[in-house]
Image (cartoon, rainbow, N blue to C red):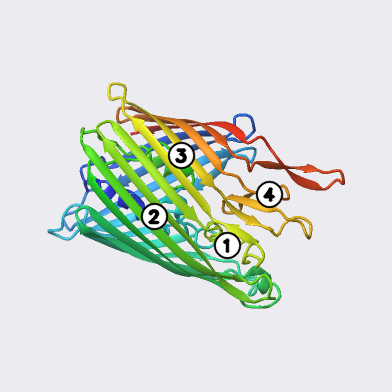
Amino acid sequence: MTVSFLTLPLLLLLGQAPDPTPTEAPFQARLSFYASDEDIDTDGSGTAFHAALEGHTPELPSGLRAEATLSFFLSTPNTQGITLQDFGSNLRLRYRPSGWEAGEGLVLAVHPLTTSRLYMGFTYPVSWERTAFPRKTGNESALELRLSRQRWDAFVALKSARVTDDLLFEAPRRYALLAGGFLDVTPELRLAAKGTVLNRGQIPSAANVGIELHVPVRGASLGALWHRGEPVGNNVDLTLYTGDPTFFERFFQPETYAGGFGASVSLEGSLVSQGLLEPEVYLQRTMQTGGAGALEARVKQGFWRAHALAYVRTLSFIQIDVPGFPPYQDFLSDAETRAEVSGTLSSDYHLQDWGVTPGLLVRVTRPASLRNAPVGAPGSNYTAVFQGPNMLTLLPEGEDPGLVVTVKATARWDLGAIVGVLAEVSYTHDPNRTTFEDDVTGLPRPVLQPANAVGVNVLLQARF
């Protein structure tokens, strides 16, 4: 189908990649190389090599067509050797009834290895349930059914995995149900919704003493998108979207500069609850609620573009897929939690003769934190600062979290339709950086580190 300005953001918003059209080549390949060094003064660099192959058969007279995507990457995370990870490979069978327009039809998709392309939420920083079962013993697979028409779309998906059960000493199969869709209320306004229900299995600590306590999860996400005029593509912000399974695809969506004006605004919110252990009542379960929201705006005039993104995530939302902190446990009643709040502004200008788009980006983040964190010696008053699920630093006693400020110079260089380069050089001021050093008694204590860091990230891609 032809990917319109309204369709492309919502395909990303709903967790879909644009479908290949019948006029495209039967096979397409992408090779990407990503090098990241968030702080050139420390040993925090890493590289990844991504490969993707997409193919489809011609559409038969009956309206049937088969499609397949193979996507994986090799990475070298520090000194841990080479890892191979699937990035959402899938098989699809598409049926378009006679008389239906291009892009309409019924799609049955199988995700045999991972389910990260089926998720709740819309914008990547506030998405969740990319993995439904954290204690799975093998692959997490999914079956998806989607019906698409010109003004609406609906889908239902079933995720499945074998999950460790410490009460039965086996791994029974569990399921997660996701459903949702969108509706074009007007040519400029689209509304979207998703819902999920699942059971993540036994709480390990309860099962170890013979008590059956499960982790039920219920959640919903709502989104809206308004647009007008020319399409406005993605900005260059590599580090914010590193974990997105469409990471190696979305930044090379072709951008058109027709000389006109374009703008879009999207708004979304998610609310989720799950059952966790009550920390101060022995083997009692409580329901923990978390939430997140995001507001994104894009503007284009001629060759100039501007992007703005603001989002908020509660700490319970950040930890929703782990789940809990400590694992499978709600926060202590005297623990003070603070939500993450982040805002990003960026602007770039396309130099048509050179195919280069330089830009500048500024981000300010108040990180999520947990005061009186359940770590360290009894009676200690530590504050944990969270950058993501189970990604935290511990501040020295009495220290409060500070704002994290990032400034980036970005560039996109399109060498025709075959090769593309994305690069960013960043300066980050993060007063929450710490390491552990032994005190005079020989006990390890968190110690503040220099707050300033300079990083470089480069993404190269060849398309065939």
> Which residue is label 2 attached to?
122
Residue 120: numbered disc: none
| Residue ID for mark 1 | 323
Residue 19 in sight: no
Dot 1 or dot 2: first in sequence order is 2
Q: Nearer the viewer, mark 3 or mark 2?
A: 2
Which residue bears the numbered disc 3?
A: 50
Q: Residues within 10 Å of mark 1 (few under 14, many from 20)?
A: many
Please report whichever mark, 3 or 2, sits nearer to the chain's N-terminal start: 3
**Dot in front, 1 or 3:** 1
Q: Indicate the position of residue 164 as horizontal and vertical percent values.
A: 60, 66
Q: Position of residue 372 (x, y in %)?
A: 69, 58
Marks 4 and 1: in contact by CB < 8 Å? no
Give the Cα separation between the discs numbered 1 and 4. 19 Å
Q: Earlier in the sequence, mark 2 or mark 4?
A: 2
The answer to whether the residue labelled 1 contacts the one labelled 3, judged by CB atoms less than 8 Å apart, is no
